[in-house]
């Protein structure tokens, strides 16, 4: 498990809880142990999920669109969250195909 400190806009994979295996975006940092997550579908930006960092796998990808939107306006649209996750999943599938998996 990757124990890096997450950043706003970073993609994470949920390992524990009601939706294991799903991807979400960090929309806020509660403290050194918890972050706020949203995916734009089940968890909207207005109702983010507080999640323990031990229950997440932090990915290397940070969505610049989400990060800049939150930094500039303090908000992000659910459409941007969905787009960021879809783009990340598509990139992961393309990499897996190139490797022959």
Image: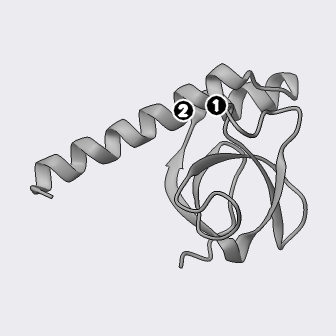
Residue 44 position within the rendered picture, expressed as x and y whole percent measured from the top left: 78, 33
Contact? badges 2 and 1 (CB < 8 Å): yes
Q: Residue at x 80, y 32 (%)?
A: 71
Dividing the picture into quarters, in which one does residue 64 lie? top right
Residue at 68% over, 72% down: 55
In which quadrant of the rendered image does the C terminus lie?
bottom left
Q: Is residue 45 left or right of residue 18?
A: right
Image location of residue 91, percent across then percent down: 33, 40
30 left or right, relative to 20:
right
Q: Quadrant of residue 12?
A: bottom right
Q: Which residue is mark 1?
A: 81
Q: Going by the picture, which residue comes out furthest to the front?
A: 18
Q: Nearer the viewer, residue 66 or 94?
A: 94
Display coloring = one colour
- Asked which secondary structure carries label 1, the reply is helix
For the point 15% across and 47% down, which residue is it? 97
| Residue 85 rendering spot, x and y as whole percentages | 52, 37
Residue 84 got which mark? 2
Toward which corner of the image does residue 2 lie, by quadrant? bottom right
Residue 39: percent from left, percent from top: 66, 39
Alpha-carbon distance for marks 2 and 1? 5 Å
- At mark 2, the secondary structure is helix
- Mark 2, Cα crowd under 10 Å, few <14 / some 14-19 / many 20+, is many
State left or right for residue 55 relative to residue 44.
left
């Amino acid at each position: 498990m990757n124990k890096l400190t997450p950043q706003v806009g970073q993609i994470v994979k949920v390992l524990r809880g009601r939706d294991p295996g799903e991807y979400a975006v960090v929309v806020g940092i509660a403290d050194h142990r918890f972050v706020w997550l949203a995916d734009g579908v089940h968890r909207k930006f207005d109702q983010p999920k507080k999640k323990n960092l031990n229950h997440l796998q932090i990915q290397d990808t940070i969505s610049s669109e989400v990060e800049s939107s939150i930094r500039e306006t303090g908000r992000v649209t659910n459409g941007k969250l969905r787009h960021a996750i879809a783009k990340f999943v598509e990139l992961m599938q393309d990499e897996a195909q190139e490797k022959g998996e």
